[in-house]
Amino acid sequence: MSLPHLLRSTVMVSLLAASSAHAGEAVFAKDGQSVAFTSFFNEDSILRLDLGTRKLETVALGAAVKGQHITSLTSGGDGELLFLTEKAAWVNDAKGTRRLCNVGAVKYPRDLVAAPAKAAGVADWLFLSGPRSAEDGGGGTEFYGRKPGDKAFTSMFCRRVNSVWAGAFASDGRFFFAGEGDLWEGSFDPEPAGGGLGSLSGVRIAPLAMMNTDSGNGGNLWVTQVMPAGKSIYVRLRGTHMGELLRVPMNPVPALDEKSGAMGSLEDHYKYLSKSLASVQRIETSGDDITASAAAVRGGDEVVFFRTRVGGGKWGLMLWSKSTGKAEQVAVEEE
């Protein structure tokens, strides 16, 4: 792949530390100076954009990864780059690239995420999601976990949640995920339960999905990526020929805390959902062209990186700022 033509800009980008770790096609470095993301043109490649110099480079992954489809990126507790292929989870750091563990029985694995040190009971665990069987073809999902040192992933018991995907930890250890098309918050019990490695409980915190059968817009628009950063939860919605990036203010009280109001009576729950929905901010509406998104806090400002089509076979690499409410094109990816 030829390197993109970088855009010159006089806008200074703060290089203070990123404060979140979440699954997806992109992830900020721990120091906030760069963002890594999957290549649009080569499924076995990861690109890294330096946000100070605007230099774009291909991450050296080694021959072992060549030809494999990279489905997800996240960061480890020490800032190492973790990524997922069809058969294994990998780590890339100053020592190079090496296999971390196999995915085990997981079919079509996706949404790799590492729990931060502040995650109660599951610090440094890895999680991912995948279809329950090959026949599902990416439909209903099951959730899997891995304790440090385990050789593969094991199924997690999810209480009354039919599907769990797009898991994401905030820097304080709170866990958010997509379920039934909407945004949820969850908590873990690391003790084995229901035949699984541990259990996950959750509560829906924002009714963001659009569900209909209108042939004019292609129907459902569901949560496909969750990105907590600072005092916000950034969410990517995706549907047929549709897609948006949203911001939802984060409730300072975890949803599973009895003081949150999210789990009281039906009326209380409706009030909680209504407040979340009323606070939603739409920050990008360029449809299903939105890919490779990630969010972080940098220099006291919440920012969202994403990729979107700019024409002529090129993809703009964008950086949205909460303080300005605008997105700036910082570089271009092209074949």
Image: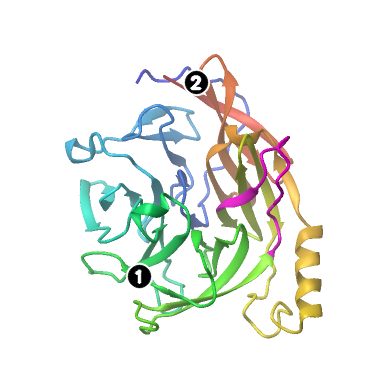
Picture disc at residue 228: none
Residue 109: in sight, yes or no?
no
Q: What crowding class fits label 1: few (fewer than 14 Cα within 10 Å), some (14-19), or many (20 or more)? A: many
In depth, the one of 230 and 207 nearer the eye is 207
Picture disc at residue 155: 1
Circle 2: element type: loop
Quarter residue 113 falls in? bottom left
Give me the C-alpha separation between circle 1 and circle 2. 43 Å
Tell me the chief SS of the magenta region. Answer: loop
Among numbered discs 1 and 2, the one appearing first in the sequence:
2
The correct choice, above or below, for 83 with respect to 4 in the image is: below
Picture disc at residue 6: 2
Taking the magenta stretch, the answer to whether it contains residue 209 is yes
- Give the quadrant of the N terminus: top left
Circle 1: element type: strand
Q: What crowding class fits label 2: few (fewer than 14 Cα within 10 Å), some (14-19), or many (20 or more)? A: some
Q: Residue at x 47, y 46 (%)?
A: 28
Quarter residue 265 falls in? bottom right
Q: Nearer the viewer, mark 1 or mark 2?
A: 1
The residue positioned farthest toward the left in the image shown: 63
